[in-house]
Image (tube, helix red, strand yellow):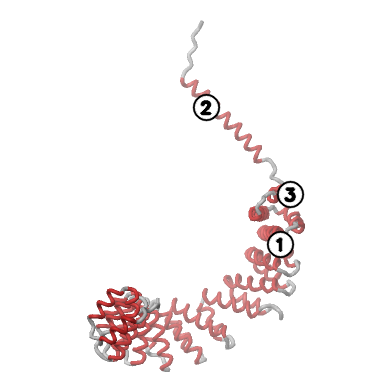
Amino acid sequence: MKHVSTSFRQIRTVICLTILSAMFLGAIAAGSETNRPPPSLAARLNKAHAETKIDDRLNALDAVGKTLASSEIPEAIKTAENLKQLRERVVFTESVLKRWGELAPAKAFAYISAMPEGMEKVESIRSVVPLYAKNDLRAAAAAVTKMNPGRSRNEAVQMLAEIWAKDDAKADIKWVNGLSAGFPKEEALRDIYFIWVHLDPAGISSTVQNLPPGETRHDLIINVAGDWAALDASNAVKWAEALPVEADRELALATVTESWADAEPLAAAEFALKLSPPEMEQRAVLAVLDRWATQEPQKALSWTAKLSDENLQQQGIARILDVFAPVSPEAAARWVSQLPAGPVRENAIGSYVEAVRLWNPEVGARLAIKTADPASRESRVEQCFSLWLAWNPESARQWLNGTDFPDAVKNRWLTEKPSQEF
């Protein structure tokens, strides 16, 4: 007998051929599975209805609607109309119509427009109008104008106006102004203006100043001034100063100045001091200080302390401390303490105590006791001490014993019911 030996190379070849054969057969099987026609709409709906839990069933119906082919839409709509449960009908109809809007927005919109007025029509309009506008904005606008009066038409007009405003606000305004009586023109125009103003405050500025007096014009002036100043303070100031109506001019300048303070608080503050009349100056300065206090409160305080107008100075310091003291009680207390004796310091201590006592009554009491006027000193310390005593009795009593208040005052504070403020 002849001995036959099998080489390693031969064995490897046999193994590789076996693997390739298996892969080939698997590919054929997978291909045959892929080529199998998908389940019919009826079969998919039956599967969805087989879900016993209502949430699972509604989700399954929604999923069927989201995956419809164009050819299945007519059958799906008829099926939706015949569903017995209201909740199933609503969910499936909305899903079908939204899917139709994705596939053929003009046809879907035409169908929805012919539906009777009601929540279902309104919700479907909300789903399809953005899809139609994305596909052909002007065709969508023409279709909307042909809708019958009702809430769904109003919704469609306002939605389309908002979408169009982001692309071409002037053309959008022209379209809305051309609508006949009965359309929500005023509401649509307002929506357009408030989208346009944030996209291009300089571009809308001339339109705004030509609007009739009223809430919309007032609010838009604030928006133009604030947004424009954040981008280009110099030109925003020029626009505001050129406004022919005094009330508009004052409103715009105050808003420009406040917005300007977010980027350049010192420049904005110096500009505010030049405004007139005095009421306008005060309003603008305080608005700047409100913004400056959130950035560099100590610099804002130092600038305010040099103001010659004592009333404005007092109000300004109080506004800054109202922001600064609760966040940084110790730093704010040090700033107030270094002020020279006099009305500015006295008022600043009062403002500090009012701002800090609910957050850190201990540091409030320690600064309040430095008040020069005896009556104010006692009142301010008491405001802080009552809370300090409630929160940390041992520390508060120890501190009070070391003060020079009369024993009768000390005993009254110690025996009074602790404050419940927080």
**Which label's residue is closer to the chain start, 2 or 3?**
2
Tell me the CA gap for discs 2 and 3: 46 Å
Mark 1 or 2, which is nearer the eye?
1
**Label 3: few (<14), some (14–19) or many (≥20) C-alpha neighbours in 10 Å:** few
What residue is shown at x 36% (from left), y 92% (from top)?
311
**Which label's residue is closer to the chain start, 1 or 3?**
3
Asked where in the image residue 253 lies, by quadrant, the reply is bottom left
Question: To which residue does mark 2 refer?
Answer: 16
Label 3, secondary structure: give it. helix
What residue is shown at x 53% (from left), y 77% (from top)?
197
- Is 243 in front, or is 383? 383
Label 1, secondary structure: give it. helix
Mark 1 or 3, which is nearer the eye?
3
Asked where in the image residue 352 lies, by quadrant, the reply is bottom left
Residue sticking out furthest to the top = 1
Q: Amino acid at mark 1?
A: Ala
- Residue 76 placed where, x, y %? 73, 55
Q: Which mark is residue 108?
A: 1
- Residue 27 placed where, x, y %? 60, 35
Tell me the CA gap for discs 1 and 2: 56 Å
- Residue 400 placed where, x, y %? 26, 80
- Is 291 in front, or is 167? 291
Q: Is residue 143 above or below residue 241?
A: above
Q: Examine the rendering and report whether any part of residue 40 can be seen.
A: yes
**Which label's residue is closer to the chain start, 1 or 2?**
2
Mark 2 or 3, which is nearer the eye?
3
Question: To which residue does mark 3 refer?
Answer: 42
Q: Examine the rendering and report whether any part of residue 136 can be seen.
A: no
What residue is shown at x 50% (from left), y 80% (from top)?
223
Q: Amino acid at mark 3?
A: Ala
Label 2, secondary structure: give it. helix
Q: Which quadrant of the rendered structure holds the C terminus? A: bottom left
